[in-house]
Structure formats: structure tokens, C-alpha cells
Amino acid sequence: MPPSRKVAVAVFGARIAYGVGLVAIPARLTRRWLGPAAETAPTQVGVRGLGAREVVLHLGALTAAVRGQPLRPWLVASIAGDASDIAATTAARGALPEGSALATLAVAGGSAAISAALAAVVDS
């Protein structure tokens, strides 16, 4: 397996683990991002949905990586998910804890940048 695919496998694994965490312990992982709302059941519905997206998307990507299939489509989908997280957080920034939108931009933007860098080298 080429080194770029090995890195992709590690990234996909980390994203799967994060998604599992969002499903299993949503309030704990989102308290700094969402503030007191992270403790409420309605908020946890959406957070668990986000976690499920992370698991399903990146499990599919991991499977493709192991099978030697193209990864760019999976990476593009991952970037789109990160971009939607940034957009949703930006739209609600006035109701979120101070610094939450900037932190989301850093984390989700960083994840998107990693995926973009991998997409540039992984299937070439």
C-alpha cells in the first residue's frame, strides 16, 4: 500500500473513532462547541446524526482504501461534510459559546485541508 494510502487509512480511522464518540457520548464531545445545548436531547439527535455520517462515510472510505479502490470521491465527500459543519456553525455563531465558530473553522477546516491534500496525491 502506497504511503499516501496509509496516511488516508489513518485519517479515516480517526474520523470513524470521532464519529463513534459523537454517537456514544455526544454531550461530552460537543460541550465546548455547542455550550449548554449539548446536554439536551434535541441537540444530541443532530450530533448523533453527525456522528453517524462520520462513521458511515469514513468506513466506506476505509473499505475503498483497503480494496485499492479510488479514494478521491470519498475525500471530496468528507470535505463537503466539513464545509457543511463550518457553514452551520457560522450561521448559528451568535447563539454559540464565544470562540466556537473560530474553533470549528480551525478543526473542520483543518480536516478539510488534510482531505484535500490527500486527494491531491492519493490516486495518482
Image (cartoon, grey):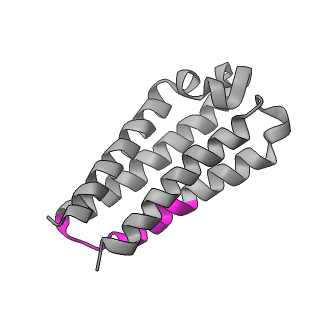
Highlighted range, magenta: 67-80
Residue extending furthest toward the bottom: 124
77 displayed left or right of 72: right
Q: Where is residue 55 in the image (x, y as percent from the top left)?
A: 40, 46
Vertical side of 84 occupied by 95: above or below: above
Residue extending furthest toward the left: 1
Residue extending furthest toward the right: 94
Whether residue 69 is in magenta: the answer is: yes
> Which residue appears at 28% of the width and 56% of the height?
7
Q: Where is residue 100 in the image (x, y as percent from the top left)?
A: 70, 35
The C terminus, quarter of image: bottom left
54 displayed left or right of 59: right
Q: Where is residue 41 in the image (x, y as percent from the top left)?
A: 65, 24
Task: Give the main secondary structure of the magenta stretch.
Answer: helix
**Residue 18 picture quarter:** top left
Vertical side of 76 occupied by 104: above or below: above
Vertical side of 78 occupied by 13: above or below: above
Q: Where is residue 114 in the image (x, y as percent from the top left)?
A: 44, 57
The N terminus, quarter of image: bottom left
Whether residue 20 is in magenta: the answer is: no
> Which residue appears at 24% of the width and 63% of the height?
5
85 displayed left or right of 119: right
| Closer to us: 6 or 17 | 6
> Which residue appears at 41% of the width and 35% of the height?
20
**Residue 95 picture quarter:** top right
